[in-house]
């Protein structure tokens, strides 16, 4: 083994060890928190996140993103949104260990549920008239509830997800998700083919569309240039399937609202085909509309505008 290979191997071991230690620290906290009642656990984790979040590198990026998205708002308002974001993220992380409790929803008894649904007629239509479809959402509220509730309606959806970078945490998250969702598709090489096969079979696909992609469609987001994945638009064009916007909204007292909108009309080119770039922009516009309504529930610490190197 050459010296270069030895160094590379050593760095890999150090990185793995670091990830393992971080994962054990987080899992230990969650184990302790799990001993508390649900509401107490959520409030405790939210409090801790609001205390320590501002001292992380991600907080600086979040404030920079907020300044770009909302130049009309003051620095104090940016800070308030960022603090709400940390609280939301802490609750989201903690809710993974309580998914069976927070996702309490019975289509036959909605008044006794923890989740209120807007768009039950869309679920009913998809069940009554099976066909290929795509549901898209964003990293806001508790987005994990959308496929869980779909499953409660008896609607099978293959969900495309990007696992956490820390593989030890990713394994725990995958296990938590797998207990409540039918079909999880990791966003690796070959994921597009997996989703295409699902649509080929007349099934449904769920996608998060607010992430950054380097080799993607040129679009705008909050008036700034961004790269947006064209995958959804390409699948919609290939299968001429319905595309439904859906989102999760965190409500007071540990409740949630899930909104499933009716199928979107997507822009087409001169040949009558769905226009990939124009559709990607329409999707971004929908994301921006949602984020503007509940900015504190979105994850501002992702480098959506590729500005991390400038701050």
Image (cartoon, rainbow, N blue to C red):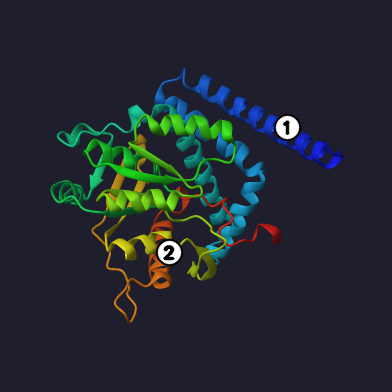
Where residue 302 appears, x then y in whole percent?
Answer: 56, 52
What residue is at 62 percent from the left and 58 percent from the top?
A: 64
Residue 3 in view? yes
Neighbour class for label 1 at 10 Å: few (<14), some, many (≥20)?
A: few
What residue is at 55 percent from the left and 58 percent from the top?
A: 304
Q: Secondary structure at mark 2?
A: helix
In the picture of the structure, the residue carrying the numbered disc 2 is 284
Where residue 277 appears, x then y in whole percent?
Answer: 43, 71
What residue is at 50 percent from the left and 35 percent from the top?
A: 46
Farthest front residue in view? 1
Q: Dividing the picture into quarters, in which one does residue 66 lie?
A: bottom right
Closest to the observer, 184 or 254: 184
Q: Is residue 93 above or below residue 246?
A: above
Residue 138 in view? no
Query: Foreground mark, 2 or 1?
Result: 1
Question: Which label was assigned to residue 13?
Answer: 1
Q: Is residue 108 left or right of residue 11?
A: left
Q: Work out which quarter of the rendered image holds the C terminus and state it.
A: bottom right
Neighbour class for label 2 at 10 Å: few (<14), some, many (≥20)?
A: many
Q: Work out which quarter of the rendered image holds the N terminus and state it.
A: top right
Where residue 123 appears, x then y in whole percent?
Answer: 20, 47
What residue is at 41 percent from the left and 21 percent from the top?
A: 37
Farthest top residue in view? 35
Q: Is residue 181 above or below residue 120?
A: above
Closest to the observer, 163 or 67: 163
Q: Dividing the picture into quarters, in which one does residue 261 lie?
A: bottom left
């Amino acid at each position: 083994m050459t010296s270069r290979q030895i160094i590379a191997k050593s760095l890999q071991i150090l990185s793995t060890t670091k990830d393992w230690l971080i994962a054990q620290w987080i899992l230990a906290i969650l184990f302790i928190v799990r001993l508390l009642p649900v509401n107490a656990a959520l409030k405790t984790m939210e409090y801790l996140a609001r205390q320590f979040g501002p001292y992380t590198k991600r907080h600086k990026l979040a404030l920079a993103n907020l300044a770009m998205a909302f130049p009309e708002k003051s620095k104090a308002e940016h800070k308030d949104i960022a603090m709400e974001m940390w609280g939301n993220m802490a609750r989201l992380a903690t809710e993974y260990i309580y998914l069976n409790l927070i996702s309490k929803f019975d289509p036959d008894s909605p008044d006794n549920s923890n989740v209120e649904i807007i768009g039950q007629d869309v679920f009913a239509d998809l069940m009554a008239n099976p066909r290929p479809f795509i549901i898209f959402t964003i990293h806001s509220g508790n987005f994990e509830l959308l496929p869980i509730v779909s499953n409660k309606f008896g609607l099978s959806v293959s969900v495309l997800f990007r696992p956490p970078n820390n593989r030890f945490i990713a394994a725990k998250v995958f296990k938590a998700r797998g207990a409540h969702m039918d079909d999880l598709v990791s966003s690796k090489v070959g994921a597009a083919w997996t989703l295409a096969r699902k649509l080929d079979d007349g099934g449904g696909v769920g996608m998060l569309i607010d992430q950054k992609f380097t080799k993607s469609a040129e679009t705008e987001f909050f008036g700034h240039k961004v790269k947006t994945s064209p995958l959804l638009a390409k699948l919609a064009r290939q299968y001429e399937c319905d595309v439904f916007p859906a989102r999760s909204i965190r409500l007071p007292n540990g409740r949630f609202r899930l909104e499933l909108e009716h199928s979107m009309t997507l822009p087409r080119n001169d040949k009558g085909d769905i226009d990939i770039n124009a559709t990607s922009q329409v999707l971004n516009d929908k994301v921006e509309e949602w984020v503007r309504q509940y900015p504190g529930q979105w994850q501002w610490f992702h480098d959506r505008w590729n500005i991390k190197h400038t701050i």
